[in-house]
Image (cartoon, rainbow, N blue to C red):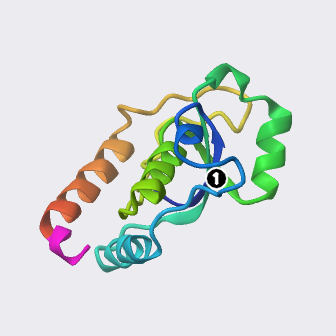
């Protein structure tokens, strides 16, 4: 589980809503609530940045290394756009990512149907349904 605290903007949507100088970040209140919920239900997580890109074949080793040095933990395709639109519209947003595939060992390891991944997805979904009002 990753709880994104910021997103590197390398997709096309966010620039329609915010100038390039603005950092895409989630709502601090909602971020805090999500972390408290995960802790309450005993789901381990890491928090840090995500690199949002819609050009998945441009995930070069040099970029991965450079972004990991600044706290990026994962690659996704939506977070920076969602955070940017939320900032623009002045509404809260946050994200909670279940990591399915890995590439950091130099080989793509898809795990979308791995029982451990499915189990975590189920626990997170059930927890969100049960405690959504606390968010």
Q: Quadrant of residue 12?
A: top right
Q: Position of residue 125 (x, y in %)?
A: 23, 54
Q: Quadrant of the C terminus?
A: bottom left
Q: Is residue 39 left or right of residue 7?
A: left
**In this rendering, would 65 be left or right of 42?**
right
Residue 35 location, x and y as percent? 41, 73
Q: Magenta segment: does it hold 132?
A: yes
Residue drawn at x 31%, y 74% is 37
Please tell me which residue is depicted at 80% across the width and 38% down the height of the picture: 63
**Left or right for 52, reference 120:** right
24 sits left or right of 27 in the view: right
Q: Magenta stretch: residue 67 in it?
A: no
In this view of the protein, which residue sits in the foreground, 3 or 121? 3
Above or below, comparing residue 58 to residue 39 in the picture: above
Residue that appears at 62% across and 24% down: 56
Residues 91 and 39: in front is 91
Pick the residue in front: 52 or 14.
Answer: 14
x then y, percent, for residue 85: 45, 49
Which x, y percent locates residue 109?
A: 57, 29
Number of residue marks: 1
Q: Is 49 above or below relative to 113?
A: below
Q: Residues within 10 Å of mark 1 (few under 14, many from 20)?
A: some
Residue at left offset 35%, top offset 76%: 33
SS type, badge 1? strand
Observer-nearest of 120 and 53: 53
Mark 1 = which residue?
A: 73
Q: Main secondary structure of the magenta part?
A: helix
Q: Which residues are magenta?
A: 131-135
């Amino acid at each position: 589980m990753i709880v994104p605290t910021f997103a590197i903007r390398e997709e096309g949507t966010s620039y329609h809503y915010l100038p390039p100088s603005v950092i895409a970040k989630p709502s601090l209140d909602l971020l805090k609530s999500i972390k408290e919920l995960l802790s309450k239900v005993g789901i381990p997580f890491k928090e840090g940045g995500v690199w949002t890109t819609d050009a998945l074949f441009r995930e070069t080793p040099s970029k991965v290394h450079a972004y990991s040095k600044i706290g990026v933990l994962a690659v996704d395709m939506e977070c920076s756009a969602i955070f940017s639109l939320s900032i623009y519209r002045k509404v809260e947003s946050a994200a909670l990512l279940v990591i399915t595939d890995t590439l950091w060992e130099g080989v793509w390891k898809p795990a979308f149907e791995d029982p451990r991944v499915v189990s975590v997805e189920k626990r997170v979904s059930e927890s969100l349904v049960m405690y959504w009002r606390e968010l």
